[in-house]
Image: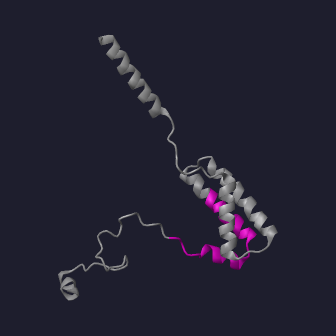
């Protein structure tokens, strides 16, 4: 009876260990370098209103080259070198006006996590600021 319990315990613990050793399954499919290059190229072409197919292909090849480099898993310093190389190549491929437009484009704001507005009053907007001093609190009442 004791051997049977020991065997069941070992079986369950080994099974659990094998399940934990498996790589986690991601809901999001991994992007290939080709997918990443297409997405970056389309965004750039749309932003700069580029209609020339030859320039589109050139930009796609450049993005593909750097997407493949990125996939190798870079250190922070190598990632900075990669970004500087991309900017240098874009400066060479784009007109001066297009490059300035690209460098000065508005940065997308990160999405707010759910519940980020939970502490705001019902009729407040996220840009409303809460009064910080007692005088400001009395003035708002």
Residue 100 falls inside the magenta stretch: yes
Relative placement, left or right, of 106 versus 46 is left
Relative placement, left or right, of 52 versus 109 is right
The colour scheme used here is one colour
Q: Residue at x 23, y 86 (%)?
A: 140
Q: Position of residue 134 (x, y in %)?
A: 18, 81
Quadrant placement of the C terminus: bottom left
In front here: 27 or 47? Answer: 27
Q: Residue at x 38, y 25 (%)?
A: 13
Q: Which residue lies furthest to the bottom in this view?
A: 139
Q: Which residue is drawn at 52% across and 43% down?
A: 25
Q: Give the range drawn in magenta.
A: 82-108
Q: Where is residue 112 in the image (x, y as percent from the top left)?
A: 42, 66
Q: Which residue lies furthest to the front in this view?
A: 1
User: How many marks can you see?
Assistant: 0
In front here: 136 or 15? Answer: 15
Q: Which residue is drawn at 59% across and 47% down?
A: 73
Q: Position of residue 37 (x, y in %)?
A: 68, 59
> On the image, which quarter does residue 80 sit in?
bottom right
Q: Position of residue 87 (x, y in %)?
A: 66, 65
Residue 91 falls inside the magenta stretch: yes
Quadrant placement of the N terminus: top left
Q: Residue furthest right?
A: 54
What's the magenta bit mostly, secondary-structure-wise?
A: helix
> On the image, which quarter does residue 66 sit in?
bottom right
In front here: 112 or 96? Answer: 112
State whether residue 99 is above or below residue 85.
below
């Amino acid at each position: 009876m004791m051997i049977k319990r020991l065997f069941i315990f070992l079986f369950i613990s080994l099974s659990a260990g094998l399940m934990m050793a498996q790589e986690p399954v991601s809901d999001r499919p991994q992007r290939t370098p080709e997918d990443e290059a297409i997405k970056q190229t389309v965004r750039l072409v749309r932003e700069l209103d580029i209609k020339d197919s030859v320039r589109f292909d050139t930009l796609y090849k450049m993005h593909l080259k750097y997407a493949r480099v990125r996939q190798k898993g870079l250190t922070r310093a190598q990632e900075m070198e990669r970004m500087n190389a991309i900017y240098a190549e874009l400066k060479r491929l784009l007109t001066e006006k297009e490059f300035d437009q690209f460098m000065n484009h508005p940065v997308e704001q990160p999405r707010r996590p759910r519940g980020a507005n939970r502490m705001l009053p019902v009729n407040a907007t996220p840009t409303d600021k809460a009064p910080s001093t007692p005088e400001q609190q009395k003035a708002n009442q």
